[in-house]
Image: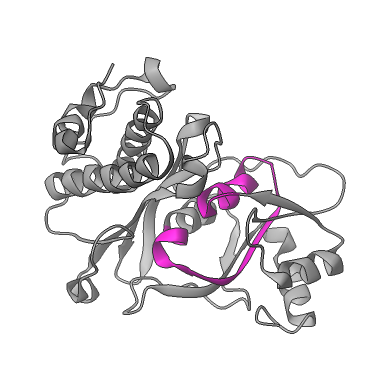
Amino acid sequence: MLTITRRADRRSRLLLLPALTAQAHGYRHLTVTASADDTLLAAELATGAGALLLELRASGLVGDELKKAGDHDANDFLLERLAVARPDDAVLSEESADSAARLDAERVWIIDPLDGTREFGEVPRVDWAVHVALWVEGRLVAGAVALPGLGRTLVSSPATPLPERPNGPLRLVVSRTRPPAVTTAVAERLGAELVPMGSAGAKATSILLGQSDVYLHGGGQYEWDSAAPVAVCAGAGLHTSRADGSPLEYNQPHPWLPDLLICRSELAEAVLGAVAAVGGIDA
């Protein structure tokens, strides 16, 4: 068992992390190597960071101290391992200063070390995630979303099988704390029920886990909030786009996306139509 110490010893516990085993968290043992293909590497990184976050949760830290340690330690873990495995690649991370150098890079890792910091701090909530995605020359080519509270990591390839949709109304997953007003209007037009949930990664992957059918977000997100979920969901055949149906673009100078739609592909036309009918996402 990894011994958690205070922040002065943060580097020591990061170096010890590879000793974490599947028995502790329901994961297989993971070793990040330079020879791993990009999707496997994304999965190894996301899963390893998730294991570290679970250890932090069990360490006795609480409140803001737990949340700050989670953000910083998971970020350090990912950055250190990317520096070893992919030293020539650029990185865009929520928890690190941005660099314009990434705009000239052919390969950019887009990471959110702890998506859903609020939920992470509310033990025992499970709707938080770790995001690791790779953008190459204009498109997302690999991604992994770890859901440590569920002991699962979903990847862009091999795709997660999409379960059959149950009978009943559509289920539209929304923020548990600040759902955009437009989602209520869209839900009403679709006859859908709202499903409140925490992090963006948890909401997006809830479609793959059979817990929802549509994730519509307005009000804006940063690229790291959606890159890995979009890669994973697109890999499974889901529709992914802006709320008006236009493509999602990543590794932009200002890494901000105003809105997002992820849904089962057979529902895309109806959802896009409902968004347009209520006047768009900014209505």
Residue 207 sits inside the magenta stretch: yes
Q: Give the range drawn in magenta.
A: 198-227
Whole-percent x, y for residue 239 in the image: 61, 62
Q: Which of 110 and 16 is in front in this view?
A: 16
Residue, x 24% and y 69% (percent of image)? 98
Q: Which of 118 and 268 is in front in this view?
A: 118
Q: Is residue 159 in view?
A: no
Q: Quadrant of residue 60?
A: top left
Residue 50 sits inside the magenta stretch: no
Q: How many labels does the image show?
A: 0
**158 sits left or right of 255 in the view:** right
Q: In which quarter of the image is residue 225?
A: bottom left
Q: Nearer the viewer, residue 279 or 176?
A: 176
Q: Is residue 277 in view?
A: yes
Residue, x 41% and y 35% (percent of image)? 62
Whole-percent x, y for residue 237 in the image: 58, 54
**163 sits left or right of 251 in the view:** right
Residue, x 39% and y 71% (percent of image)? 250
Q: Quadrant of residue 182?
A: bottom right
What colour scheme has been applied to the protein in the rendered image? one colour
Q: In which quarter of the image is the N terminus?
A: top left
Residue, x 71% and y 83% (percent of image)? 283
Whole-percent x, y for residue 42 in the image: 33, 45
Whole-percent x, y for residue 251 in the image: 33, 71
| 107 relative to 251, above or below | above
